[in-house]
Amino acid sequence: MPETSTAASAEDVPVPQAATRRNRARTPLGWWLSWTWLGAVVLAAVLAPLLPLWDPAVPDYENVFGGITPQHWLGGDTLGRDTFSRVVYGARTSLLVGICAVGLGAIVGGTLGMLAGYFGGRTERVLALVTDIVLAFPGLVLMIAIVAILGANLTNLILGLAVLSVPTFIRLTRAATLVATQREFVLAARAYGSRPLRIIAREIAPNVVLPVAAVAFIMVGTFIVVEGSLSFLGLGIPPPTPSWGGMIAAGRTELIDYPHISLFPAAVMFLTVLSINYIGERTRKLFEFRESNL
């Protein structure tokens, strides 16, 4: 008996220490810095019309290739437009594209994925076939085709990116649904005689939201980069509407003499996407840790 109690107490010692280390590691400095930067970008984008900014679309030929001054914090672009103002308004465009495209894809793909995972059979096979076809098609080629056929504008860009995100959310929610359907509360709801749609809405959907939200957060950053790439190629948001990719493209011919024209929007895009990816990855790991303890 004494040996057993000694062994048990020795085994119990590392547990609270490990828990303490995990608690300290849950909120690193990068987490707060990422949220601070992302919050500042979102706040500036939302309040842009109310801020005392220069008109981002009106040229100022006295400020062409202008440097950093108290009036123009980030200088001027090739037409003299205020770079800081265009970066702020470009955040509105990039965030709108990323959030709306991912949100639309998550709603459509999440709904179809839950239906496929719960009902299975022919519904699952058809959705799996459609998903494989879309994933097999190069995403950039599909976006170029959509823009070429429908035209380059904000609505078509959002719809095209949403179509690309639907297969990812179908697979994710289908896998999460297959796991959730084996849980006791779902089996109890079935035994109680609840309708399938009621079970999906009230029992399965709340358990699918967290993994979908973590992946969706990361995809917002991915789509911001995609929007910037398309705008850089001239297939994104048409001028004079400011976008980070369009600003980078506008200054590519002046990189040697006036690098600030492309450097500042590229830096803001990099920091924003880095913050989004960091937060999304931490959220995903936190969800996986909680799932392992269930």
Image (cartoon, helix red, strand yellow):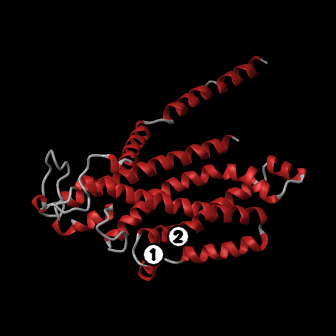
Q: Which residue is mark 1?
A: 143
Crowd rating for badge 2 (residues with CA inside 10 Å; few <14, some 14–19, many 20+): many
Tag 1 secondary structure: helix
What label sits on residue 104 in the rendered view? none
Give the camera-side residue of 267 and 9.
267
Give the camera-side residue of 5 and 135.
135
Give the camera-side residue of 55 and 97.
55
| Residue drawn at point x = 78 percent, y = 49 percent | 183
| Residue drawn at point x = 66 percent, y = 53 percent | 208
**Which mark is first along the chain, 2 or 1?**
1
Proximity of marks 1 and 2: CB atoms separated by less than 8 Å: yes
Tell me the quadrant of the picture where the N terminus can be found. Answer: top right
Indicate whether 256 appears above or below 146.
Answer: above
Tag 2 secondary structure: helix
Left or right of 235: which side holds 82? left
| Residue drawn at point x = 15 percent, y = 44 percent | 70
Residue lying farthest to the bottom in this orientation? 149
Q: Position of residue 261 (x, y in %)?
A: 20, 60
Q: Which residue is mark 2?
A: 164
Residue lying farthest to the top in this orientation? 2
| Residue drawn at point x = 49 percent, y = 72 percent | 160
